[in-house]
């Protein structure tokens, strides 16, 4: 099967890694909350046309694109757009433009978000016991790390395969279902705090990371 080509800002891309590099550069150099201009705007506007729900997301066209700090993870940035027919900004995933996220991955992401308060509280409590220096030693790499560079790790097999959610695609918008999952999580989860570098390295191998 031939590789998909992406036509972005007057150039053709057949390698997704080049697109990802461009997007990250745009996000890094763009001031938070200020509209993208020039080639950065054109590149992202053209990329969003490949979103699997582009018609409903972008409507008659994108008037403005801004970069914002991700609410879930302040170390990440995300893109928000304002359509020509709208007054409010909406978030849009650029990674979805390169290939739709599988349903199971979406379910896992929704579960991670549902228990974010639990995992963050566990992380805070762990660091409260770290003493005045406020550093922990990573159980994977052995490096010292601070609260700002900490992640919480789960056993993903127990976490997701053991929860009966009744659907292959779910976003946990149902509050009763969210409550059920949080209770399930708290009954089976085995948590440990580790460095961001170690957790991200593990997630690339087995998608077990919960930032």
Image (spheres, helix red, strand yellow):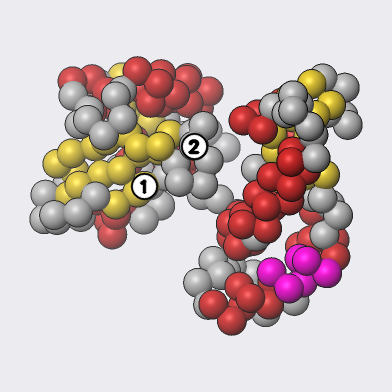
Q: Is residue 51 above or below residue 56?
A: above
Q: Secondary structure at mark 2?
A: loop
Please, which residue is most extreme toward the left here?
A: 85
Q: Separation of disc 2 and disc 1 at Cα?
A: 17 Å
Which badge, 2 or 1, comes first in the chain's sequence? Answer: 2
Q: Which residue is mark 2?
A: 74
Q: Quadrant of residue 104?
A: bottom right
In x, y percent, where is residue 26?
A: 35, 22
Q: Which residue is mark 1?
A: 92
Q: Is residue 134 above or below residue 169?
A: above
Residues in magenta, as a range: 182-187
Q: Is residue 130 visible?
A: yes
Q: From the viewer's perspective, is 107 left or right of 136?
A: left
Q: Quadrant of residue 166?
A: bottom right
Q: Quadrant of residue 146?
A: top right
In x, y percent, where is residue 103?
A: 60, 60
Quadrant of the image for the N terminus? top right
In x, y percent, where is residue 158?
A: 85, 61
Closer to the camera: disc 2 or disc 1? 2
The residue carrying pointer 2 sits among few (fewer than 14), some (14 to 19) or many (20 or more) residues within 10 Å by Cα, namely few
In x, y percent, where is residue 41?
A: 23, 28
Q: Secondary structure at mark 1?
A: strand
* Magenta stretch: helix, strand or loop mostly: helix
Q: Is residue 12 visible?
A: no
The residue carrying pointer 1 sits among few (fewer than 14), some (14 to 19) or many (20 or more) residues within 10 Å by Cα, namely some
Question: Which mark, residue 48?
Answer: none
Q: Nearer the viewer, residue 163 or 43?
A: 163
């Amino acid at each position: 099967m031939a590789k998909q080509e992406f036509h972005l800002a007057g150039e053709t891309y057949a390698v997704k890694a080049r697109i990802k590099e461009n997007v990250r550069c745009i996000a890094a150099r763009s001031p938070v909350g200020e509209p993208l201009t020039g080639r950065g705007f054109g590149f992202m506007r053209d990329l969003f046309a490949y979103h699997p729900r582009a018609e409903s997301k972008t409507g008659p066209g994108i008037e403005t694109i801004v970069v914002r700090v991700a609410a879930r993870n302040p170390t990440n940035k995300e893109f928000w757009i304002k359509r020509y027919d709208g007054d409010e900004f909406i978030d849009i995933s650029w990674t979805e433009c390169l290939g739709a996220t599988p349903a199971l991955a979406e379910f896992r992401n929704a579960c991670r978000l549902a228990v974010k308060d639990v995992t963050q509280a566990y992380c805070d409590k762990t660091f409260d016991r770290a003493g005045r220096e406020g550093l922990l030693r990573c159980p994977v790499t052995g490096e010292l790390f601070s609260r700002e560079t900490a992640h919480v790790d789960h056993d993903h097999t127990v976490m997701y395969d053991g929860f009966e959610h009744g659907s292959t695609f779910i976003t946990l918008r149902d509050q009763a279902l969210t409550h059920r999952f949080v209770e399930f999580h708290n009954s089976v989860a085995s948590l440990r705090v580790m460095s961001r570098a170690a957790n991200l390295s593990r997630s690339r191998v087995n998608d077990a990371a919960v930032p």
